[in-house]
Image (tube, grey):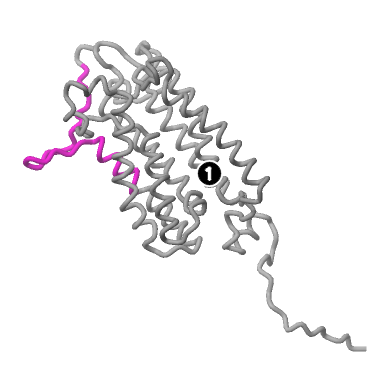
């Protein structure tokens, strides 16, 4: 049966000289749905209607460039003889950590120039970033990349996976663990947690830091079973090193910001009614009174 398995076509459609890959479609879909989710919340938090669209206009292309540069740097041995191949992003090879670094730097510069709070923007977009990552992993699935060690077909069948996933995990004569799926599910669970934490009214910046910690914990363990990975000094898995640094750095940052009064504002501070719902207090928004006390009638 294995001999008859044909992998899914990574090409979605061809329009003359233009070839559209599923990889790009999933990345675009993740960015679009993430934008819709974040834009609705941004308007609730008092941002202009077109603020996120403007930010995305800069952040999306720069993130793709950052993701590719990061990947090529740690896989330069594959491109040294054919440097032009470094531009073929449609063939896969985008590192999420590179994209995140580029996106954060872009958002910091954007917020400073527009007079916005970077941490406020980061908190609003955190669930959307994770949603985009979850959807984007299916682009890796179509390219038959981001997979784990070799397993048997029965191993995949016992996971109750549909046939189209099992068949796509048949690569070069063997079946492999669908680590792309592990990460996608982990990220979707993280989205649900972050959306819940919005209502908890964390201190400003901590929703985004929680996102970074959550993703890094999952990525550390998933990276441990992946077979296609980037290495530092040819020994350490890059993503695992970055994940450890991010988790430790995130915890230290939360403590430091709280201790030094840099996180006194909270996520819902600009929405008193939402604060009331989060804390369970009714009539949180105080009404102004004339200051006159009514005399009791005898």
Q: Report whether 248 appears left or right of 36.
A: right
The residue drawn where x is 46% and y is 28% is 242
Farthest-out residue, left: 16
For label 1, the residue is 194
Q: Position of residue 244 (x, y in %)?
A: 52, 27
From the image, which quarter does the C terminus lie in?
Answer: bottom right
Farthest-out residue, right: 298
Q: Position of residue 182 (x, y in %)?
A: 43, 27
The residue drawn where x is 39% and y is 28% is 181
Q: Using the image, determine if residue 220 lies above or below residue 22.
A: above
Q: Nearer the viewer, residue 54 or 178?
A: 54
Instruction: Choose top left, top right, bottom left or bottom right for residue 176.
Output: top left
Q: Position of residue 160 (x, y in %)?
A: 41, 22
Q: Report whether 62 appears left or right of 200.
A: left
From the image, which quarter does the N terminus lie in?
Answer: top left
Q: How many marks?
A: 1
Q: Report whether 236 appears left or right of 92.
A: right
Q: Using the image, determine if residue 200 lies above or below residue 287.
A: above
The residue drawn where x is 7% and y is 40% is 17
Q: Which residues are magenta?
A: 5-32
Instruction: Choose top left, top right, bottom left or bottom right for residue 269.
Output: bottom right
Q: Position of residue 22 (x, y in %)?
A: 23, 36
Q: Using the image, determine if residue 97 lies above or below residue 295.
A: above
Q: Nearer the viewer, residue 260 or 255?
A: 260
| 21 is within the stretch colored magenta | yes
The residue drawn where x is 76% and y is 82% is 291
| 131 is within the stretch colored magenta | no
Q: Residues within 10 Å of mark 1 (few under 14, many from 20)?
A: many
Farthest-out residue, bottom: 298
Instruction: Choose top left, top right, bottom left or bottom right for residue 292.
Output: bottom right
Q: Under tag 1, what secondary structure? A: helix
């Amino acid at each position: 049966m294995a001999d008859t398995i044909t992998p899914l076509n990574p090409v979605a459609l061809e329009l003359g000289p233009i070839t559209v890959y599923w990889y790009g479609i999933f990345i675009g879909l993740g960015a679009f749905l993430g934008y819709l989710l974040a834009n609705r919340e941004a308007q609730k938090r008092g941002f202009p209607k077109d603020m996120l669209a403007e930010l995305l206009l800069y952040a999306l292309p720069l993130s793709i460039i950052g993701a590719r540069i990061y990947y090529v740097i740690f896989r330069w041995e594959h491109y040294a003889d054919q440097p032009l191949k470094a531009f073929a992003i449609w063939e896969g090879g985008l590192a999420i950590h590179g994209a995140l670094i580029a996106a954060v730097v872009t958002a910091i510069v954007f917020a400073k120039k527009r007079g916005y709070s970077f941490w406020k923007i980061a908190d609003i977009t955190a669930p959307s970033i994770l949603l985009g990552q979850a959807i984007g992993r299916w682009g890796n699935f179509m390219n038959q990349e981001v997979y784990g060690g070799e397993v048997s077909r029965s191993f995949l069948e016992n996971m109750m996976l549909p046939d189209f996933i099992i068949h796509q995990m048949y690569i070069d004569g063997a079946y492999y663990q669908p680590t792309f799926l592990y990460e996608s599910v982990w990220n979707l669970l993280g989205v649900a947690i972050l959306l819940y934490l919005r209502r908890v009214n964390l201190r400003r910046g901590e929703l985004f830091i929680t996102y970074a910690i959550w993703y890094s914990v999952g990525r550390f363990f998933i990276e441990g079973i992946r077979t296609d990975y980037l290495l530092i000094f040819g020994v350490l898995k890059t993503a695992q090193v970055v994940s450890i640094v991010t988790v430790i750095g995130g915890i230290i940052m939360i403590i430091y910001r709280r201790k030094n009064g840099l996180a006194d504002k909270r996520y819902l501070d600009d929405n008193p009614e939402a604060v009331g719902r989060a804390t369970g207090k009714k009539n949180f928004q105080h009404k102004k009174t004339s200051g006159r006390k009514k005399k009791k009638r005898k």
